[in-house]
Amino acid sequence: MTEPTIGVIGAGAWGTALAIHLAKLHPEITLWARNSEALQEIIAHKENKRYLPGSTLPDNIIASTDFAMMVSNCTHVLVAVPSTTMRDMMQRINTHASNKLRGIIWACKGLEQNSGKFLHQVAEEELATGINTAILSGPSFAQEVGKGLPTAVTIASVDETFANEVAQLFHHPLFRTYISTDVTGVEIGGTFKNILAIAAGIIDGLQFGANARAALITRGVAEMTRFGKKLGANTDTFSGLSGIGDIVLTCTENMSRNRRFGLGLGAGKSLQQVEQEIGQVIEGKYAAKVVFDLAQKLDIELPISTQVYEVLYNNKPAREAVEELLSRSLKNEAD
């Protein structure tokens, strides 16, 4: 394969970190963002001071202010934007893609808010036939990737050949890539980890202790598995990087904005106050509603996810939600 031409869409923390990583492996990486003025400032200062302070951008990351030109010249496009904008981004890429494009990779997690569809379903609906797609997921904080700290991720695609191709694009001694063809399972893991991180944050914000947090994570994995099984995922996926790996990371480390969101709620702050303090999209807030709606439709019992939904959308006090979970009737752990 000839040298790939890679464009990164999104100059938030994650997009910037992945661009820095890819720049170690390829001659040139093009970075695009909606706010062209902020993007030019990032490139000029060799640092994303707002979203990724402390990580230096290599000289071979260049800014693009022309979306159409960038996409038309790329062999691979990496999308690192909030999942709420996924459909719009797929439409725009499809409009400008040329026959050079080998495929699209996205590093966003969650489900489409209005439809409840998986992101791979959104991509299938909006992209021309023949455009390969893959997902990058797993336990990976942008701050650590930007600094070049050891990381392992999953690359998932229904096309195993393309999954291998993308894995090669990203693979580095300090950034190990594993492949999967279970796209649904990987996307469910990336969705649930944000909901459970909010729940774990609430537990710690209430100062209920490490025992309670460990129990919540464990039962959260059981919920994720139950949900995934109903939707046809390979349940083995949930024991991997994109499942329990990502859950452990986001439920236990304060670099997770979803966990910090839960911490604030558990400490008694209002939803609006915590969102304002964090100042970034809280993917788990949207995921909680979509998963709740799907669970109701498919008759799946998800006690933790349901209580997170009640706190976020029905103003249920965080302490009351946790106490209700603890007071549930006895049951077999395998259920």
Image (spheres, helix red, strand yellow):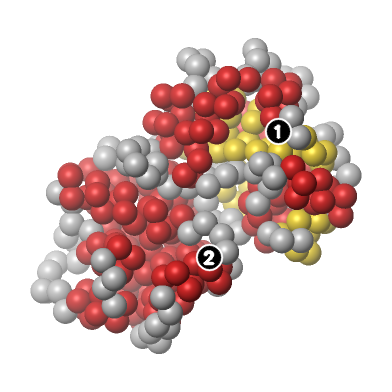
Is the residue marked by circle 1 packed among few (<14), some (14-19), or many (20+) residues within 10 Å?
many
Q: Is residue 217 visible?
A: no
- Residue positioned most to the top: 99
Residue with the mark numbered 1? 7
Q: Tag 1: residue type?
A: Gly
Q: Which residue is depicted at the point 68% across and 42% down?
A: 33
Kindly identify the residue that appears in the image at 22 percent across and 64 percent down: 303
What mark, if any, has residue 257 been given in the picture? 2
**In which quadrant is the N terminus drawn?**
top right
Q: Which quarter of the figure has residue 210? A: bottom left
Closer to us: 118 or 286? 286
Residue at 68% over, 59% down: 51
**Between marks 1 and 2, how big is the CA–CA gap?**
26 Å
Quarter of the image where one finds residue 187: top left
Q: Amino acid at mark 2?
A: Arg
For the point 37% across and 69% down, which residue is it?
Answer: 199
Query: Crowdedness of circle 2 by 10 Å Cα count: few (<14), some, many (20+)?
Result: many
Earlier sequence position, callout 1 versus callout 2? 1
